[in-house]
Image: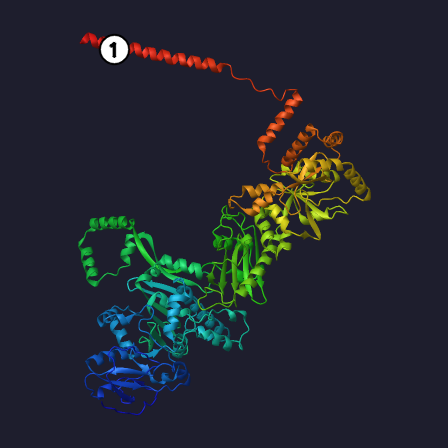
Amino acid sequence: MRKEFVTPLRRTGRQVTRDSPDANPRLLCKKNVDREFELILPAITIVDKLSTYSPSDEESYLVDISLKSREISREYSRIASAMCCFHSPIGRRHLDRVLTGLCPIGFVKAENLEEDVGIVENDLGASREGSRTDNEVVQREEEAIKLDGLNVAQIKELREKAEKFMFQTEVNRIMKLIINSLYRNKDIFLRELISNASDALDKIRLLSLTDKNVLDTNPELAIWIKSDKENKILSITDSGIGMTKNELINNLGTIAKSGTAEFLSKMQDTSNNQDLNDMIGQFGVGFYSAFLVSHTVVVTSKHNDDKQYIWESDSNSYSIVEHPKGDTLKRGTRVSLHLKDEALDFLEEDTIKNLVKKYSQFINFPIYLWSSKVVQVDEDDVDENVPASKEDESKKEESEDKVDEEEDAKVEDAEEEKKTKKVDKTIWDWELLNDSKPIWTLKPSDVEDKDYNDFYKALTKDTQDPLAKIHFVAEGEVTFKSLLFIPKVQPSDSFNRYGTKADNIKLYVRRVFITDKFTDMMPNYLSFIRGIVDSDDLPLNVSRENLQQHKLIKVIKKKLIRKVLDMIKKIPKDDYEKFWKEYSTNIKLGVIEDAQNRARLSKLLLFQSSIQKGATSLSEYVSRMKPNQQYIYYIAGSSEEEVKKSPFVERLDKKGYEVLYLTEAVDEYAISALPEFDGKKFQNVAKEGFSLDEGKKAKERMEQLKTTFEPLVKWLNDILKDQISKAQVSERLTDSPCALVASMFGWTGNMERLAISNAHQKTDDPQKNYYLNQKKTLEINPRHPLIRELLHRVEVDSTDQTAKDIALMMFRTATLRSGYMLRETASFADSVEQLMRKTLGISLDEVPEEEELQEEESGSMEKQESEKVVDIDVNEDEQDEEKHDEL
């Protein structure tokens, strides 16, 4: 074994290759190293002058590279700073692998060795060249597209002259994160590239405010998109500020570094314009999303202060070279994507239009697409566009000299006929894609109602104008602009999708669409709200798809809800009736679900009333309350007719108290969730606890009645102990003899009906069974004649059977009258029949008469069957006789 030592390589500003005389690495010889080894490169190393040594077969050399950067040393101290190279025939192949791993494109800048360098994997992302043969690589290069008018040979020459660089961060990890995890939808690459183009245009526009000469090279500020299906290229071009050579290295060669932050800090001293914040550069790695759909990215950029350069990368490394044709862009940047085979759909015009409309239709600058359309033109017009050769022109002149006047006339006629013929012609031109204006960025005073209506229809695809709108700017912990609408009609299936993810609120960051897949932006009961939220400083993660701080979304949600409720509150009365017809259930569900905004939502509620025609609000009810009235009285039922005839409102109606009628299924739940309104508590007149404060005399009279009817109350408690919890004298009845009253926390008849009819419930629900089996309180009307007669009978004979039957009948009728469902319907029908017999003087033992025609009908049926049998027998005898005669 032979050892040779040399001094380390001196760092100069020159490029170093295998043949450079300055390359002088220190070599250590090692014997019998395994031929198949795993290449680990902690930093960029330079291998040179290996051919000057003459090693023997199977002999290997260990190349030791000292790491000068302390930062790299700390990060890679655990990684062996060495690599093994064989100089046998087998070792040669390993050496090629080493060189390929070090310099996939070619050169390494020696001056960049001081900087932090990440590990590069050959199989990273879409460009997996490590698994391809050399022939495949050559074929792929020869199939390269023509870039900026350059052919394949020119591109190869440029690549040989180009400066080759390695990415300055751990590109392999970041790229894997981008390609595999960060972005769930590949189509967002176009959003990111258009956003970057918009950044560049914003920069040059802001610079032009202080220096108008910066726009001399190209005054037009726009974005152009062009697809080349033949070469599988998609290019995005902008006339923005462009990038110098150093900016290409610093901005595109380093992940998570953006020139926007530096630009903002630089412009902060020169301009306080609000548009200074109009940049989308805080996302860092958006450019690298291009590798989701492309195997190679080529960036051509021209800055006013530098030459035009071409930057090319396959996600492993990149190269930069000066453009051979000089200044072709004038100013700006073109990003050319060499699309993968599975991403060729992004070359289709319709796909590009849909993506721009989805993500970037509100970008400040016009976005154009190179598109084609077919028009009908005269056939001569098509021919005129094709230039004729000199030979054709000379022949045409000779033929025109030979023809006579008649032939000339015929030719003229034929030409006229030819001109009248229409043919299809394909015309290519730039088509504007983002004609919609982000009107939410304007002041509300500068926007007309027609503009709002047109924007709403474009946003929601609705054919009608919105019922209401609100346009505002919120400031505080997070600043955002918003434009919200209420549709005139709610979709018929809205409650079938209640609680599911809605896409009615679209989140933008500086007019760039981020997402509409929100479950927390609006509560479920306000899912009908349509609109846009645009934040200038909303912090996002690198992919723009998940919010970095959910706390700020909660702040936005809180402000949006309050603004929406204010918008609803300000709807004019005539329009509010239309709103309530469509969205009343949503507001009541909000009262149940949103405890934080329950007080605000209660001011929006409307109910039918016993006094006022039409719906009334709780505020209006409170304003009409009697001086000593302490409660807001209400009753729930299936219809207004039912609750009007309920026994629970009899006394209230006679005394002139207003009662709210709750006739929708959700009403009683909503009111139960409200503890009070404007300092007044709610009282369900169908439950216990009802009382009217009518003074001392009224209380004394009630006490006397209770004393008088105490025997009857005790008797009813004993007779109906299996049906009721207790009996008592009522304060709410005037016309009805009795009624069933629910306990304070029990279910009313309306609530029981809703619970039983609920289709979404368990077969055997313990909670439901508990409430359904609760006994009710039987309240009797001491002024009713039936109750007085019953008291008299009980006082005379407490064992009177008629009194017992009447008590049972009164309980059952009270059950139906109070809105509850009667369970023993057959027994109730029998008791009603018995009362009718007694009333009509018919004996209870008398039974219905039997049918007399039953026996006769049965006899006649037997007779008919016997006749049929006889007929059949006679016919059979006749047939037998005929057969006998024949024999």
Q: Residue furthest front?
A: 799
Front residue of this view, candidates 733 and 881: 881
Q: How many marks?
A: 1
**Quadrant of the rendered structure where residue 811 is?**
top right
In this rendering, does residue 818 appear at all? yes
Q: Please state the horizontal and vertical placement of residue 231, each as a whole percent of the image.
A: 29, 64
Whether residue 842 sits left or right of residue 368 in the image: it is right
Whether residue 513 sits left or right of residue 228 in the image: it is right
Here the colouring is rainbow
The residue at the point 38 percent across, 81 percent down is: 76
Q: Please state the horizontal and vertical placement of residue 526, each as a whole percent of the image.
A: 55, 53
Image height of 736 relative to 498, above or below: above
* Neighbour tally class for label 1: few under 14, some 14-19, many 20 plus, Cα within 10 Å: few
**Quadrant of the rendered structure where residue 751 is?**
top right
Front residue of this view, candidates 797 and 531: 797
The residue at the point 31 percent across, 56 percent down is: 426
Q: Please state the horizontal and vertical placement of residue 690, each as a whole percent of the image.
A: 71, 44
Q: Circle 1 sits in a helix, a strand or a loop, which is it? A: helix
In the picture of the structure, the residue carrying the numbered disc 1 is 879
Mark 1 residue type: Gln
